[in-house]
Image: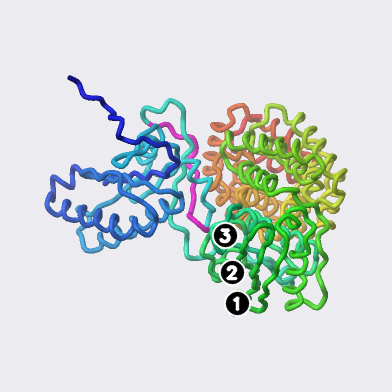
Amino acid sequence: MIPEILPPEIEITRVVRTVLVADVVESVRLMQEDESGTVQRWRGFVDHVVHRLLPGQDGRLVKSLGDGLMLEFSRVSNAVNVAFAMQDVTAQANRDVEPSHRLHLRIGINVTQLIADEHDVYGHGVNLAARLMTLAGPDEIVVSADVRDQLTPALDADIEDLGECYVKHVQQPIRAFRVGAPGEQPVIERGNLAEDLHATIAVIPFRPRALQPTGDVLGQLLADEVISALSHSPEVNVISRLSTSTFQGRDVKLEEVRAYLRADYVLSGSYHADADRVTLKAEMAETRTMQVVWSQTLKGSINSVIAGDDPLAGRLVHEACAALMVRELQRSQGKAPQSLQNHTLLLSSIALMHRISPLAFERAQQLLQVLIERAPRLASPYAWMAKWHVLRVTQGWSADSQADGNAALENTKRALDRDATLSLAMTVEGQVNTYILKRLDVAEQFYAQALQSNPNDSLAWLLKGTLHAFRDEGKEALRHTRHALKLSPLDPLKYYFDSLAATAALSAGQNERALSLATRSLRLNRTHGSTLRVLIATLWRLGREEEARRRAQELLKLDPGFRVSTFLERSPSAAFEGGRRVAQALELAGVPK
């Protein structure tokens, strides 16, 4: 009698896990040349991984093969940390081994829904982790787009986009990224002296002191309220929520915040929720001296905080800033979502629209539409929906840029009808007028209005600087884009900020800076055609003509139908000398007319 393949007592569950697959490079040769030594070193390495690395990172060994490992983790960050640690272990062990006998690993990581039991994990996503590993060279780590979406460049890892890659037994190409351990030196630039006269404040999402039914959402909401209140003062620089939220759920060290955000002061703390009451313990620390300059315990109503009626955030801002500045800061009059569920929808949609996955991007629109239907009186969902339409054009996912532009304008109008001071809506209105309608004078007015409403709107500074670059006003372009990078150094669209800053540097004649920014941008997203065009023009201006020609071929491979005439038709700079010089460089580098 043939036994059942899956006896009913074996429990099968579907879970979302991060899978790490590691393999020893040239294992067959190593075994042939030094079998006992290779086995000994490999067994010692596996023992170190299992007993030293995995316990502290919530990981487990799924299987150990003769020359490879499969590990499983509940979180992406844990898997990446272990991958970096594995590289360190092998590097240290290899110091005492002759070069031809050293162990070199290649690693692939994917996060996926899979089937798991007590012995093994199964599913297409597991196989994909193994396929990603085949793209890695010796001592390299390659991850999927879903893994990359949960990493912050520079803070979590050094990230390089490998583009669309074909792997064995997978019909469609997959987006892959090479990652390395983050560097010790900060990657964020200081602003100019005039900008540094103002204190820069970073508000880190407040952490729950115990497991909360609301998760971390309430802590993010409290931080958003404080950021909103602080941002309306021209007396301070406030790091954007998209950058500070990177530190949510982390063991934050002041040295890291200072290095990555260039913040002079950090406002952070913890909260405890009980029924409708919330108790917030907040403190402000000076990053240079590592000293706490202010601390306070504040209490409020959760429902009132969500509705924007509770004075908790205002009291926190007033008391904290009294220790730093002579005059009080204005409180924000912006409206907050009416329920915690709505706020969760908003946070989720913002996170999804800044990912590089088209599926995640489409999901963001669905969540925003639900929020708009649920809370039609709120302004911010319409503003984010407008930004979604513009992002679809800039990402190259729009089938009709004019239609998306009109949809964006319709949503900004609805947002401003509900809140005439909402800077995001004004900024997106300016963006549509810049890139789609080519009405630069109108766009400049909207950027000015946005910055008058919110002097710390990093996107408005960035786009206003780029507008100056299009008009060959290099000095102003450079100043504004530098300030944008300072206000949002860890933005989810960091490649976009760097790309437009490169455009500004090119217009100002700072070719080496333009080259550095464009190169950095392409490391994060190598499929951004606009960055490639800036890089080609910069290389040609620097006399690096052969490299410019190679990049031009890369551009044409990415967009076979692209022509110089396409650039002149689409770019707002085409009517100015700088735009014409870029067009000339493209043609000389080999882009067809």
- Residue 541 visible here: no
> Which residue in the protein does label 3 denote?
247
The residues tagged by marks 2 and 3 sit, at their Cα atoms, a distance apart of 12 Å
Residue 288's disc number: 1
Badge 1 amino acid: Arg
In this view, 40 is above or below 320: above
Residue sitting farthest toward the front: 275
Highlighted magenta segment, given as a residue range: 155-167
User: What residue lies at 82% left-to-right and 72% top-to-bottom?
Assistant: 328
Q: Position of residue 574 (x, y in %)?
A: 76, 39
User: With 539 as the anchor, is 221 left or right in this view?
Assistant: right
- Pair 2/3: label in front: 3
The residue singled out by tag 2 in the image is 258
Find residue 37 and report its horizontal and vertical position in percent. Answer: 14, 54
Viewer-closest of 490 and 561 = 490
Above or below, comparing residue 278 to residue 389 in the picture:
below
Could you say whether the residue bearing mark 3 is in a helix, strand or loop?
A: helix
* Membership of 164 in magenta stretch: yes
Magenta-drawn stretch, dominant element (helix, strand or loop): strand
Do labels 2 and 1 touch, CB within 8 Å? yes
Name the residue at 70% across, 36% down.
370
Crowd class of label 3 (few under 14; some 14 to 19; many from 20; radius 10 Å): some
Q: How far apart, in angstroms, are the residues tagged by discs 3 and 1?
A: 19 Å
Taking depth in this image into account, of 88 and 563 the one nearest to the observer is: 88
Depth check: 296 or 568 in front?
296
Whether pointer 3 and pointer 1 mark residues with C-beta atoms closer than 8 Å, the reply is no
Mark 2 or mark 1, earlier in chain: 2
Q: Position of residue 387 (x, y in %)?
A: 73, 42
Question: Which image quarter: residue 3?
Answer: top left
